[in-house]
Image (cartoon, grey):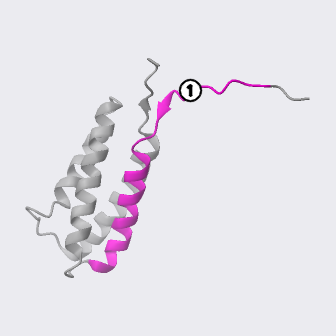
Amino acid sequence: MSTSRTPQQPTVNRAALAPGIIAAIVLLAGLALIGGAWYLYVQYAVAILALIMCVFAGQAKQWWWLVGLVPIAVVWNPVWPLAIDGTVLRALHVVASVFLVCAAVLIKIPADTRR
C-alpha cells in the first residue's frame, strides 16, 4: 500500500543557521585564545559571520535580531578593537554564542514562491 506524494516546496529558508552555529563554535573555541596572537582570527570570523546574519535577518524582515547582531559585530570587530576586560570578554563570548544559536534557529526567510 504505497501512496505517491508530490514533494512540497519549503515555505521558509533557514539561511542563517550555518553562519550562526559556526560563529557560536568559533566563539566557544576562542575562549582559549583570548589574549593570544590567534585571537585576531576569532575576531574576524565572528564579526563577518554576525554581519552575514544581519543580512539574513533583514531579508527575513526580522529587524529585532539586529539589536544583538550589530553589537556582536562591533565588539568582535578586529579593525577597531574595543578594550574589554578578560573576564567580561569571556562572559560576552558565552552570551553571544547563545544569542547567535537562538538567532540562527529562529531567523526564517520566506521562500521564493515565483517558480
User: What secondary structure is marked by label 1?
Assistant: loop
Q: Nearer the viewer, residue 67 or 57?
A: 57
Q: Residue at x 56, y 26 (%)?
A: 9
- Please report the bounds of the magenta region as a residue range: 4-33
Q: State the residue lying farthest toward the left.
A: 80
In the rendering, at what x and y percent does residue 114 appear? Answer: 44, 17
Left or right of residue 81, residue 54 in this image: right
Q: Residues within 10 Å of mark 1 (few under 14, many from 20)?
A: few
Q: Tell me the quadrant of the picture where the N terminus can be found.
A: top right
Q: Is residue 101 above or below residue 67?
A: below
2, above or below 69, in the image: above
Residue at image position (32%, 31%) is: 59
As for residue 23 lying within the magenta part, the answer is: yes
21 or 84: nearer the viewer: 21
Does residue 12 belong to the magenta stretch? yes
Task: Estimate the x, y position of residue 14 in percent, counting from the top left.
Answer: 45, 40
Q: Position of residue 74 (x, y in %)?
A: 17, 55
Whether 19 is drawn above or below 60: the answer is below
Q: Is residue 2 left or right of residue 31?
A: right
Q: Tell me which residue sits at (28%, 33%) in the image.
A: 58
Query: Residue tagged by mark 1?
Result: 9
Residue 97 visible to the viewer: no
- Total numbered badges shown on the rendered structure: 1
Q: Quadrant of residue 103?
A: top left
Residue 94, quarter of picture: bottom left
Q: Is residue 112 left or right of residue 8?
A: left
Splitting the image into 4 quarters, where does residue 16 fall? top left
Label 1 sits on what residue type? Gln
Residue extending farthest top? 114
Q: Where's residue 90, x and y in %? A: 29, 71
